[in-house]
Structures are given as structure tokens and as C-alpha cells.
Image (tube, coloured by chain):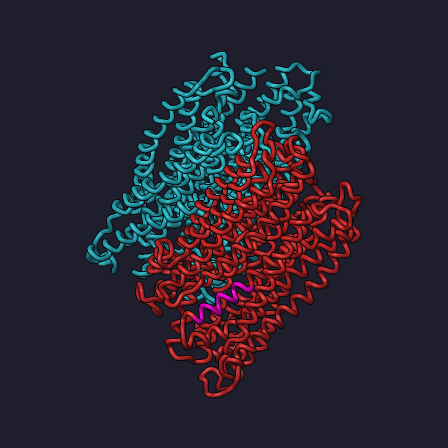
Chain colours: A red, B cyan
Amino acid sequence: MYAFWNIFSLLIAVASIAYAVNLFKQIMLKDPGDAVMQKIATAVQQGGRAFLHAEYKWLAVFVTVVFAALCLGPDDGKEQFLGWRTAVGFLLGSVASAGAGYFGMHCATRAAVRTMQAAKTSLGGALDIAFKSGTVMGMTVVGLGLLGITLLMLFYRQDGTNFVNYVLGFSFGASSIALFARVGGGIYTKAADVGGDLVGKLEAGIPEDDPRNPAVIADNVGDNVGDVAGMGADLFESYVGAIVSTSIIGWSLVPTVLTGVAHSDAMTSLLLYPIVLSAIGIVASFLGTLRVKADDESRLSAALFGGLIAASVFLVIGGALVTSIMLPTPLMTMNGTTTATPWNVYWAMVTGLTAGVVIGKVTEYYTSEKMAPAQTIAQQSQTGAATNIIYGLATGMASTWIPTVVLALAIYWCNALAGIYGICVAAVGMLSTLGISLGVDAYGPVADNAGGLAEMSHQPPEVRKRTDSLDATGNTTAAIGKGFAIGSAALTALALFAAYKVAAKVDLSLDNAHVVMGLLIGAMLPFVFSSMAMKAVGKAANAMVEEVRRQFREIKGLKDGTGGEPDYNRCIAISTEGALREMVAPGVLAMLAPIAVGMIFGKAAVGGLLAGSTATGVMMALFMANAGGAWDNAKKYIEAGHLGGKGSDTHKAAVTGDTVGDPFKDTAGPSINILMKLMTITSLIALPLF
Amino acid sequence: MYAFWNIFSLLIAVASIAYAVNLFKQIMLKDPGDAVMQKIATAVQQGGRAFLHAEYKWLAVFVTVVFAALCLGPDDGKEQFLGWRTAVGFLLGSVASAGAGYFGMHCATRAAVRTMQAAKTSLGGALDIAFKSGTVMGMTVVGLGLLGITLLMLFYRQDGTNFVNYVLGFSFGASSIALFARVGGGIYTKAADVGGDLVGKLEAGIPEDDPRNPAVIADNVGDNVGDVAGMGADLFESYVGAIVSTSIIGWSLVPTVLTGVAHSDAMTSLLLYPIVLSAIGIVASFLGTLRVKADDESRLSAALFGGLIAASVFLVIGGALVTSIMLPTPLMTMNGTTTATPWNVYWAMVTGLTAGVVIGKVTEYYTSEKMAPAQTIAQQSQTGAATNIIYGLATGMASTWIPTVVLALAIYWCNALAGIYGICVAAVGMLSTLGISLGVDAYGPVADNAGGLAEMSHQPPEVRKRTDSLDATGNTTAAIGKGFAIGSAALTALALFAAYKVAAKVDLSLDNAHVVMGLLIGAMLPFVFSSMAMKAVGKAANAMVEEVRRQFREIKGLKDGTGGEPDYNRCIAISTEGALREMVAPGVLAMLAPIAVGMIFGKAAVGGLLAGSTATGVMMALFMANAGGAWDNAKKYIEAGHLGGKGSDTHKAAVTGDTVGDPFKDTAGPSINILMKLMTITSLIALPLF
């Protein structure tokens, strides 16, 4: 059974990557536009590559050091499982995460210019390219994730040792790369954006995306390294983390598996189930992507959301099939009395899938310019920036409640269905359609960049109008994607936490003073981490401000457009250096905090720390992402002509809110998703030290 | 033993109140100034009284309903302890809390005008009155708190039933009144402040505290109902909660008490210890207050802090004496092996006392205009309001780390010393010198109001200069007081949580899915609560803006000062109505959330909820209080002539930050202190329902 499903999943993983490569080739065949567009697009492509190269050079050192440390770690094959086997998994996870980010961005920067070119003739053609590029990202992430896991299944089996004991290294590799990619990308994009806007829009008085602004290419690059590569790395690690922790929990549930079924069979079923489910999810995502087509603006959003729903329906059907084939009946006993059937597990998966969609939709409600929250913030901007900020913060805080209640109910319900395994399977369910849901999400930055390119290459207004409507839809789907990323991060963190509890074998009761002290420290970390990320953006943006001011001052004819070429590369270099320098401290904090607490205060304190950081982390991630999104759309609502429109005092107040929201929603907020997971997996790996 | 220490503590409590009354009489003998001052002061006094009357009328209904519900609650004298005995405690706690707030405010409004009058001749005389007024508040709070507890000791004993089973009602009464007082007072003061400033300073262009502004009296009243009555109620419930929960925990530790000592003796000792310690703390505070004297500005801060330190030293000495007399040796076994001596408990008390002072000092660092954080925010204001806000938020988030680490270490250390009882005693230690520390804190608003009165009655500049220096020192001591309030709230919440764990007898392990779901919901509540409080301020402030605009429009000659009297009472009425209307929803949320979760999901979920809300609550309270304080002082730093001074663009940006900070530091932030404790005590009381 093990070998069959292993190969089955591996083949689907390979097919997923092949599909992504095929889509990429299709995109490359499209018309890349004229020489002017090509020149700008090439600058963006080179800038993005330059950043990733610099980042990966730094990360190579980091990966080498950790690889060596893991090799030297204890591995007795019974209780402690570090050593070279875990190190190999770590290396593979790091490379796969970096590779997914690299390929996704490579494709996105090439797709953007072609999307713009297609927008010259039709909306449908432009959507096709942009969505294909998003799908490349989605299918690459799930394909590489599942490929890595299935390869390691082969590898560890052949070695005669146990998959579940060593596979964590893979997840650890994915997590650590993800954190640096998210934080680094987040700082890069906002330094370029905020720095460029502060001088360009406010001081020099030139419009957004104007090619005279020296930071404009860096800003464009930033969208790619932040929203494409960063988001991809984030969800890659959620995807991997959810599957891996569910397999581990499934395997370790053996003592409670019913005696009517052979132990090893039941263990293997529970181990394989999340892997095969994810393989089916890839097929479902593939089928869903085929349905995304639209020719006029009004159907755009429905087409994308329709694809997502179609994929979910396919998964619900396919999942039922897999469940009935794979899982023995009855499956396991819980609490010594009740029995969980395979269908209990199945419904836990469906619950997770549903919870993800609901949380995504709630995020859309709190941030959309068509809904009350963002409009209220816009109205409060009439009495100035202070009331805009107060209402934005209050909206972000209020937005935590529905997602939290949905998560809590999902946990309660999945636990009633199939215990801790049910909660883990819910995380897998939520993420199983990632192939398409990430595609829908990563399509946004491509559309956004296509619009930027249209502006920079002075295209006629109808082109800009088409890219704008693609972009507007992209903002909505991005909101859904963000809610989804947070919800899945929370469930994945809980699944990993369950694995920690199993491995640590320690009293994690809230009676225990060590748990309580850890809980407080853990609750504090997301706050301090966010503070560091926000200050980092400020510092990097200040360096950008200086440089843009210098160029406007020293390069003659640049500001008034009478001659003088801006030095884009200097700005790109400043963003790159700033991001790399500032990403280290928060990254190190995330990895060292649980290790330090574990070595000084022990396993129970770490358990408390992880619970505390997950609890606060979910709230901070929702608060910051939604406040930032609401501020952004409140500004757009005013720019659409409401309450005085562009240039009014109300608009100025709203711009202040939007600027505050930038590091909230694009740097600190999304990084917390990874913080939660990385700390848990670091604790799992470092457990022998505690 | 019981009777002796009961009477001993009761007498000290009575002495404390007598001292407060005596100080009040001394204040009233001072010169209340001329007719103009008297007229303004009377308006403030009447406004404050009007608000408290309206608030208490509303609360009387609430108290009656809860009293009736408690009377009807189950009381079998074995497992369930509601009924009329708990209801009587509740009533007493409510009345004592309301009484302390009322008397403190009554005194503060009368002291302010006399402080101003004294400031006409000397700084020393003015300090003397302002500090005496603060001490009245401090001594009333501790006196009434201890009196209530000792009276209930007599009452329950005479009734033959157990003190520890019914005394929680007293704490519950204190908590519920405190929440409404804090939230209502916080909304009142900020609605008047923000609303008055938005029209007066920004639209009409008249200075702060100008008597032409119709909201000026309401603003002045707000300082009293928020900072005096609200703060008093907050610390009253911390004080009572810490003592009561420590007594309960001490009593219930009986199974682990050493067999060498008679059980009932040891139980009684552990029950009495926190009560007697608090009595000694009152004496220490009294001795400390005698040392507070200063004649020139440079010695002001040192005099106040010196009094606090002196009281701490007296407590350390007196506590040693009490420990050696009261506690049997050896005291108890912990974890079956190690033994805690009386001195272990003593050092836990000293640890709590020290931690409180350290956390207070850290708060001062993060908010003082003389330190780097506030100055950095001021510098960031040079690039506009957005960077001011970003750095202010980041500073608030960063400020969580030292207090959290100090709390965590205190918990770790006190647990090592004397288990859960040690942690509870630390809370008592931190609060035992409340008589003076609240005095030092409550002196600030009196000095502030004296300054406002000087402005309104057009006093010569040297008077204003004296009150300003009193006020500046008050801001520093208020920062210490706020840190202290949060630290003590956290420890008290943990002590109450320990009592919940003992009473609930349920598995609170983080393995338990119900605990995890509760944890998430609990972590969410402080966010939603803060959101409600902030929006409430916005709504109430908007109503005030409309009214002030109307008066400037309709009352001829008001704006240019050529005639026309402002209608202060209308503004007072608007603040009062707004505060009462808006305080209900967050208050009800705080009380119903744990009850609803408990009734639907059971005791374990509530345990998780309490842990989650305490963990996030501490962070949010620190974040909001310190961000608000830092913004405030960044503005003051600029107003002192730095970075362009008053009226510059930098100053305008800083004013935006200060306005955002107002509901942070004076409404939402401090209310969370109470939220944490109230939810725990509500859960304890409502336990039979779960």
C-alpha cells in the first residue's frame, strides 16, 4: 500500500510541475510588446533576479551552517532524530522553497509585460496570461512540495528508517527560507514604495508609476519579490507543514487504533492519507483552473472565484473516493470510548476546506471598498488623519472576531470528529486546493505590474482601463488569499504544535508555572517581531528617500522631463541592501527565541511559548493585514470620486492611513504567519537540546 | 490566631480611612481662592458629580439584577457557593468600589482649585495639597479594600461558613464596577478632550483650556472621572483580587502542607498572610507619605519616588517581622519533595514588589520625553504624520518585551520559591504599597487640573509655571503608575486564574482541543474590546464636535470673546450620555463572553479563554498605554522648542499621533487591565453554570 500511494502521489507531483512548465512556455510564446516595454520589463526582471541572487547568496551561508549543525545533531534512531538524514530533508526543503519562489517570480515578471501587450486588444487575453502566470506559481508550489515529500518517502524507506522521524527537516528548510523571503521581500517592497512615494508624489509632485521617479523600477520589482516570491514561500511552507505534521500525528496515533485492524496498516493509512489527499487536491486544482475564463469586466471576479469553488467541489468528490479506498473501517478509538470512522476524518477535511473559504470571504468584507468598514474609514478621514487612523486600527482589531470564531468552531468540531488528527486533517483540507487558490492570489501582482508597465510606457487610456479592472479584481482575490494564508497558518501551527506535544512528552497544563511563563513570552514575540519589521521598513525607506532626493537634485532635467535618465539600479541596490540587512534581526529572533527559552526553562516553557505566540500571532496577523487592506481601499474609495475625491483634504488623510497600512499589510502582518510556524518547527527540531 | 489578625487588620483598615478623612479635612481648610476660581471649580465639581450620579444610577440597576441572580444561584455549602452570602459580598464590593471612586473624585476636584491658589505663593505648598489629595485616594482605596475583606471575615465566620468560599463575591463586585468606571470614565474624558480640541484648537483657533470653549469644563471633569475615579476603581479591584485569590489558594493548598504542623493552623496562616501583609503595607505607605516634601522643582520627582521607595523599604522590614511571627516552619512541601519555608514566601513577596517598581520604571523609559523612544517618534514626525504613527505603533509594540520578561522571570522565580502560592503572594507584594503608589499617581490629575484652572482664570505666568512643573512631574509618575497597574493586573489575573484552576478541577492541558479553542477566543477578546472602546470614543467625540460647533455658531460673541457665555452644561450632558451609552456593549461583552463559552463548550474552554485573554491582554495593555504615552510626550518634546517647535509641520504631525494615542492610553489600554481580571472572576462565579 505504502509503495503504491507513494508512486501515485509522486507522479501527480511531477505532472503538476510539468503543467506549470507547460503554462510558462505558453506565456513565453505570447507577444512581449515593443522595444520600450521590453526595456522596462527587462529592468524589472533583472532587478528581481539581482535581489533573489543576493538574498540566496546570504541564505546559502545560513543553510550551510544549519545543515552542518543538523548533521552534528544527535541521531540514535530511537528517541533523537537529527543527523544527516534530517539535514538532507532540510537542504531539500530549502532548495525547493527557494526554487518555487525563483521560478514563480521569473514567470511573473515575464507575464506582466505580455499581459499588458494583450490588454491592448482584449481583456480576456490579458486575464488569460495573468491567471496562467498565477497558476504557474500555484502549481509549482504544490508540485515541488508534494514532490519533495514523496521523494523523501522513497529515500527514507530505502534507507530502512522511518519517514516520520526525519521528514521534519524538509518542513524546517521550507520554514526558514520562507521567513527570510517574506521579511526580506516585505521590507524591499515597502521601502521602495514608501520611499519612492514620499519624494515622488509628495515632494516632486509627479504621478505614481511615472518613469522619471528613480525608485519606480525598484517599486515594481518589490511587488514581485514581496507579493509573488514571498507569498509563494509562505504558502509552500504552510502546505508542507500541514501535510508533514498530519502524517506524523497519524502515525503516532497507533496506540489508539482499533485492534480489529492490523496496526501497521492503520498507521500507514493515517500517514498516507494527507499525502494522497493533497495529490487529489492538485488534480482538483488543475480541473478548476480550466474553468477560469472571462471576456468582460463584470465576470472577472466570478470567473476566478468560480474556479476556486469548482476545485473545492472536485476535491470533495475525489476526497470521498480516496477516503473510502484508503482508510480502514472502523478507524480508531478516541478517549477510549467513541469510535472515529473514515467518514469522520473526511468531514474534518471538508470542514477545513469550508473554514478557509469563509475566512477568506470575511477578509474581503473587512477590506473591500464596496463594504461598510472601508467606507466608514473613508468617512472618518473627513475629520483628519487622526480619526482615519483610529478607525483603521479599530477596524483591524474588530476583524479578528469572525475568523477566530470560525477557527475555534472548526477546531471544536474536527476534534469531536477525529481528535487531534481531525484538526490536522482540517489544515490539509484547507490547503489542498492551494494550486488554484495561490494561482488566484498570485495573479493579482501580475495584473498590478501590467498596469504599472502601461503607465510607464505611456499606453492609451483603454489599455490602462483594462489592466485597472484586472488589478481591481486582483485586489479582491488577494484579500481572500490573505485571509486564507492566515487561517491555514493558524491550523498548520496547531498541527505542528500537536506534533510538538507528542514529541516532547511533557505536562503542558496551564497549572504549570513554566507553561504560563512561556505563554506570556510567546504572546509578546509577535509584538516585538512586528515592531522590528515596521522599524526596518522605516529605516530602509529613509535610505531610499535620500537617494531619490539626491537624483532629483543632481541629475539635470530629470524632474521636469527635459532629459536626464534616472539611475534605477542605484535604487534597486539600496532596496536590496536595506532588505537584506534588516531581515536578519527579526529572522534570528524567531529562530533563537524558542531555543533560548527551551535551553534555559525547558520543554514545558517552550510549549507555553508556542501556544502564546500562535494565539497572539493569529490576532496580530489578522489585525495588521485587515487594517492595512481597509486603509488601502478607503483611499481607493475616495480616489474613485467619493467624499471630495483625489487631492481633497479627506484624500490626504486617507493617504496617511494607507502609508501606515503599508508595513502592516505587506511586511509585518504576513511575516507573522511564518513566525508562528517557524517557531514551532524550530522547537521540534531543537527538542534534543531542551 | 484568626480572630486576632482579623481585628488587627480591620483596625489598620479603619485607621487608613481615618487618615484619608483627616487629610481631606486638612485640604478643605486651605484657601479655595477668589470668586472667579470658585465659580469654575464649582462647575467642575458639579459636572463630575452629575456624571457619577448618572453612572451610579445605571450601575444600581445592574448591581440589583446581579445581586438577585447571585441570591438565586446554587449554594449547597459543599461544592457550590453562590446564594445570598456571595451576593452580600458582591453588594459590599460594588458599594466600596463606587464609594472609593466617589470620595477620591470629590476630594480631587476640591483639591485642584486649592492647589492652584497655593501655587500663587509657593511650589511646596501646592505640591503638599496635590499630593495629599492623591494620598486621600490611595488610602481610601486600600482602607476600604481591607475593611471590606476583614468585615467579611467576621461576617462569614460568625455565620459558621467558610470565608474562602464566599469572599469572591466581594472581588466580583469590585471588578464589575471597576470595568464600567474605567470604560465609562475613559470614554467621557476622551470624548470631551478630542471633541473640544478638534473644534476649539483646530477650527476656532483658540488655545487649550480657554474658557470660551464650551467643552472646557467637560474636559476638566473628564480628567477627574477618568484618571481619578477610573484609576482608583481599577486598582481597588486589583488590590482586592490579589488578596482574595491568594487567601483562597493558600487555604486550598492544605493537602501539601507538612504534617509536622496542625492542618488548620497552617491553612489559616496561609489564608491570613496576604491580608496581614496588606495591613503592614498600609502602615508602610503611611510612613512613606510623610517623607514626600519638596520646595523646588528639581526635587519634585525625587521626593515622590523617594516616598515610594521608603514605603517599599518599610514593607520589606515589616514583612519580615510578620513572616517570622505568622508562618509555621517548615511551611509546606512542593511537588512532593522540596520544602518551602516561610522565607520562601517572603522572598516571593519581595520579588513582586521589585518587579512592580522595575515595570513602572520601564514604562517611564518608553514614554518619557527625556528618553530615546519618544524623541525618535518626534524626529520621525519630520517626514509627516504617517511615519509618526508607524514609529509610535512600533514603539508601543517593542515596549512589551522588558515588562513581559520581568513578569515571566518573576513567575518562574516565585514558583520555584513557593509554587502557585508564591506567584499569588508576588501579586500581593506588588500591590501592598498601593496606599502611596496610587497617591503618587492620582496626584497627577490634580496638578493637571490646577493648571487648567490657572489658565481659565487668567492667572499670572509664574502661577502657571509652578502648576506646569507639578504637572510635568505628574506625567512621569503617572507613567510609572500605569506600568504598575498593568503589571499588578497581570499577576492578579494569574492569581485569580490559579483559583479558577483549583475550583474547576478540569484538565487544562494544551493537548486538549477545548483549551486550544478557548485560548484563541480569549486571545481575540482584548482586540475586539479595544476596537469597541476606540470606536465608542470616536462616536462620543463626534457628538461633542457637533455641539461645540453649534455653540460657536449660535451664541453671538462667544468665539471672539466679546460676550456670550458658553453652555458648559450641555457639553457635560453630552459627554455623560455618550459615555454611559457606549460603555454598556464592551462591559457586557466582558461579562458574557466567558459565561457563553463556558455554557456551550465547558470548563476547559473557559480555562483556555482566560489564559488567552490574559496573555494578549497584557500585551495590548502595554502596547496601547506606552504607544499613547510616547506619542503624547513626543508632542510635548516638540512643543518644548525642539525640531521646529509649536505650530511647525512637525508639530502638526505629532498632534495627529497624540490624538490617536488618546483613546489608546486613556480608554482602551487601561480598560484591558480590568477586562482580564473581570473575565476570570466572572468565570469563577459562574462556574456552577458550566
Locate residue B584 relative to residue B552 in the image: left or right. right
Total numbered labels: 0
Name the residue at 62% across, 52% down: A240
Q: Which residues are magenta?
A: A125-136
Task: Please say whether residue B16 is visible from this viewpoint.
Answer: no
Q: Residue furthest bottom?
A: A562
**Figure check: A206 above or below B310:** below
Give the percent coordinates (x, y) of residue B154: 49, 16
- Reply yes or no: does residue A569 show up in magenta: no
**Figure check: B123 above or below A559:** above
The prevailing secondary structure element of the residues shown in magenta is: helix
Depth check: give the residue in front, B197 or A608.
Answer: A608
Which image quadrant is residue B253 in?
top right
**Figure check: B336 above or below B657:** above
Locate residue A370 relative to residue A404 in the image: left or right. left
Classify the position of the N terminus of chain B by image quarter: top right
Depth check: give the residue in front, B606 or B240.
Answer: B606
Name the residue at 51% across, 18% down: B79
Name the residue at 30% across, 50% down: B215
Depth check: give the residue in front, A338 or B378.
Answer: A338
Give the percent coordinates (x, y) of residue A603: 69, 40
Give the percent coordinates (x, y) of residue A147: 65, 57
Give the percent coordinates (x, y) of residue A535: 56, 60
